[in-house]
Image: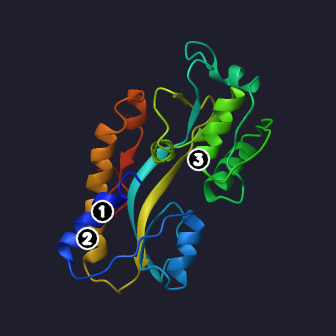
Amino acid sequence: ASITPELMKQLHDHFPHVELSVTSGRSDDLTRQLEHRLADIIVTGQLPGDSLRYEDFPVLREPFIVVAPAGVIDGSRDVGRQIEQLPYSPYNVSMPIGRTIALHLRRLKLSFGSPASFDASRSVFAMAHKCGGWAITTPLCLLDSQMDSHVMECFRLPFAGSSRTISLVVRRDEFGELPANLAGVTRRLVGDMLRTDLVDLPRWVAETSVILGDDGQAI
């Protein structure tokens, strides 16, 4: 929701006679659609397994962050100690983002009690808000949920940090220069979003969200 409408407008401007079909969903579902030729171009957080058949263009590296209803966590005090006393609202581990977060916590030997898990950011945040709890997510997930920034507050992870990379992925050697051009447009749109849509969030959220070039390095 953050960039798709403008990206589609850009595509339509370049190819006015081509009908575009847009699907949104889980990263693993989109990747499977690409592998089964049900999609031609995807923007995803999960790359296909066969790197020889596919070409990926890194777009964004974004941090995992803690979010909680306004006033539940006092940022001037130890956030780690506070979340230990609050209910945790996680993503379901069937979701790519849920698996990534669960694996990171397991590596750190951290475990948090949770009343339920969810497969949509809106549900994760709604549960955290209802229970006066907290969640681990990313800035894009927070923006796509369209949750009012004044309702949820953001905090750095109070333990070793982690991040995920969002990439534009296509089947190799099928679309000429189009994927590279689209990746450039996507980077510009995401950069514009970081400067505008994140303005109501703490400054460090935008500063730790990094636009990436084709080589995976910050640009």
- Label 1 near label 2: C-beta < 8 Å? yes
Label 3 crowding class (10 Å Cα cut-off): few <14, some 14-19, many 20+?
many
Residue 18 lies, with reference to residue 180, above or below; the image says below
Label 2 crowding class (10 Å Cα cut-off): few <14, some 14-19, many 20+?
some
Q: Give the Cα distance between marks 2 and 1.
A: 6 Å
Where on the picture, by quarter, is residue 21?
bottom left
**Amino acid on which the number 1 mark rests in the picture:** Leu
Residue at left 33%, top 42%? 194
Residue 117 lies, with reference to residue 51, above or below; the image says above
Residue labelled with disc 3: 121
Residue labelled with disc 1: 7
Residue at left 47%, top 48%? 144
Q: Which mark is residue 60?
A: none
Q: Nearer the viewer, residue 78 or 86?
A: 86
Q: Nearer the viewer, residue 176 or 90?
A: 90
> From the viewer's perspective, is 192 left or right of 99?
left
* Quarter in which the N terminus is drawn: bottom left
At numbered mark 3, what does the secondary structure look like: helix, strand or loop?
Answer: helix
Residue labelled with disc 2: 11
At numbered mark 1, what does the secondary structure look like: helix, strand or loop?
Answer: helix
**Amino acid on which the number 2 mark rests in the picture:** Leu
Which mark sits nearer the N-terminus, 3 or 1? 1
Picture coordinates of residue 154 (x, y %)? Answer: 52, 29
Q: Give the Cα distance between marks 2 and 3.
A: 28 Å
Q: Give the Cα distance between marks 3 and 1.
A: 22 Å
